[in-house]
Amino acid sequence: MVDNFRAFVAEEAIWGPATATHSRDRNTSAVTEGEWKSATATYTKEMDGSIINEGACGYGDLHRASYGKYSASLSTMLFNRGITCGACFELRCVDHIRWCLPGSPTVILTATDFCPPNYGLSADYGGWCNFPQEHFEMSEAAFAEIAERMADIVPVQYRRVKCDRNGGLRFTITGNSHFYQALVTNVGSEGELMAVKVKGSKTGWIPMARNWGQNWQCNVNLKGQPLSFEVTTSEKITLTAYNVAPANWQFGQSYEGKQF
């Protein structure tokens, strides 16, 4: 059981209408349920049994991002320098008759944070996130769906699954006149994004660079222009959402597009 408190800043959400188109690279396939792999899991104790803090993916209040109760921090091997942010994993507790719940029920989690290594401790006693361990630090509520809360650490099996989201992709806009950043949340399908582009009414498509987690940036002044977005998942599925934000969009607000 690990205490893990981080500050967060909640942002006002304004959802707007949008249209979308989809395309798929014919040489790739969508994420499907793969083979079960072995890992370990612990949980972080929060007041309401779920993780609500910002974390290394930059999601802010995880309840507003719809990830709160079913979220996890990933070890270095799984986090992949933030590329895995937003991906979904199915977990089940195995091979521990005392701590695993009967029948090995499963829970589906979203990757929302990084579990840093602690090389001062051994991998089986506190250094669970040390490289090359594969480890999930879960919310307490999610952990309790597969194992007894009294357990410190349990063996688990995991696999990647598609993310099933309610509503559309959400784009939270921050920055200033010379620095434009968009946080993309509530991503369905693979959950993780590999590329994001933005388009104003006076511009072409502008590639955005990953700042950190699922925060994407560009150095273009887009003020006063309605904004469209093109996002591409790790499986090269592309969604184009037109007119997500109106011309009078404001920094610190969020806008909803379509979903995969």
Image (cartoon, rainbow, N blue to C red):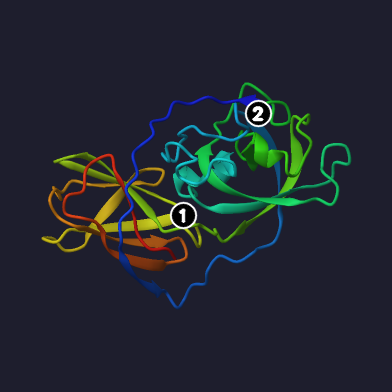
The location of residue 29, given as percent across then percent down, is 52, 72
- The answer to whether residue 39 is seen in the rendering is yes
The image quarter in which residue 164 lies: bottom right
In the image, farthest residue toward the top: 120
Q: Hey, what amino acid is under mark 1?
A: Glu
* Residue at 49% from the left image edge and 57% from the top image edge: 166
Q: Determine the secondary structure under disc 1.
A: loop
Q: Hey, what amino acid is under mark 2?
A: Gly
Tell whether 227 sits left or right of 117.
Answer: left
- Front residue (pair 34, 138): 138
Disc marking residue 192: 1
Q: Which residue is mark 2?
A: 127
Tell whether 255 sits left or right of 156.
Answer: left
- Front residue (pair 141, 163): 141
Q: Quadrant of the C terminus?
A: bottom left
- The answer to whether residue 133 is seen in the rendering is no
Mark 2, other Cα within 10 Å: few <14 / some 14–19 / many ≥20: some
The location of residue 192, given as percent across then percent down, is 46, 54
